Image: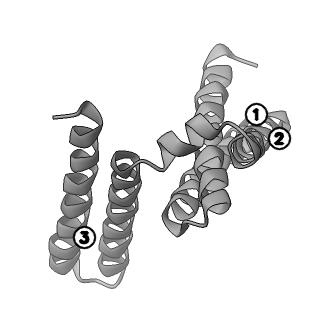
Amino acid sequence: MPVYTLSLLGLAGLVGFWAGAATGAGLRERRALPVAWGLLVGAASLYAGHAVAAGIGSWGGLAWLAVCFAGGGLAVGLGLRGLRSWLLRRAVVSLMAGTLIMAFGALLGAMLYQGGLEALSLILGGAGFLFGAMWFGSGLKQLRGK
């Protein structure tokens, strides 16, 4: 496999592990937001792996990403209390909420654009994305402690 393919799978594996960890933490503590964020980001990671696997004709990379996602979920859900508590901090939850709001804004904008409402898609989708980005920025500020 080429180096760039391995690099992409490594990065997607790291993202998949974090997504699985958030999902495991949310399931263990019965919180919906980390589960939703983990499933969204994990699905994106697996989609990237699917695209790579289809492009190079090898499904080992996709299996690797599924193992990373499941491993992160099991490790944090069944152990690693420190990482679980870090993932459930208010600042990290703000990051997750901002990401989901940005994704919703982007989806809303795309749906309105497909419906032929380009101006409305820019206004509503852009406003939703901007609101999510501000929420995400709030989480970053909280993480920095300022």
At label 2, counting other C-alpha atoms closer than 10 Å, the crowd grade (few under 14, some 14-19, many 20 or more) is some
Q: Tell me the kind of residue under disc 2.
A: Ala
Q: Which residue type does callout 1 highlight?
A: Ile
Residue 78 visible to the viewer = yes
Q: Earlier in the sequence, mark 3 or mark 2?
A: 2
Disc ID at residue 63: 2
Task: Tell me the mark number nearer the camera, choosing from 3 and 1.
Answer: 3
> Is 138 situated left or right of 76 in this image?
left
Q: Secondary structure at mark 3?
A: helix
With 127 as the anchor, is 83 left or right in this view?
right
Q: Is residue 24 left or right of residue 128?
A: right
* Residue beneath the point at 18% across and 80% down: 120
**Res. 43 visible in picture:** no
Residue 129's spot in the image, x, y percent? 25, 61
Report crowding for label 3: few under 14, some 14 to 19, many 20 or more residues within 10 A (C-alpha).
Answer: many
> Counting residues from the N terminus, which is met first, the one under dot 2 or under dot 1?
1
Which quadrant of the figure has residue 72? top right
| Residue hosting label 1 | 56
Give the residue type that dot 3 points to: Gly
Q: Looking at the picture, tell me which residue is in the foreground, 29 or 66.
A: 29
Q: Residue at x 34, y 65 (%)?
A: 101
Residue drawn 37% across the image and 60% down it: 97
The residue sitting at the top extreme is 3
Q: Position of residue 102 (x, y in %)?
A: 32, 60
Q: How many marks?
A: 3
Tell me: residue 126, above or below residue 117.
above
How far, Cα to Cα, is label 3 from label 2? 34 Å
Mark 3 highlights which residue? 125
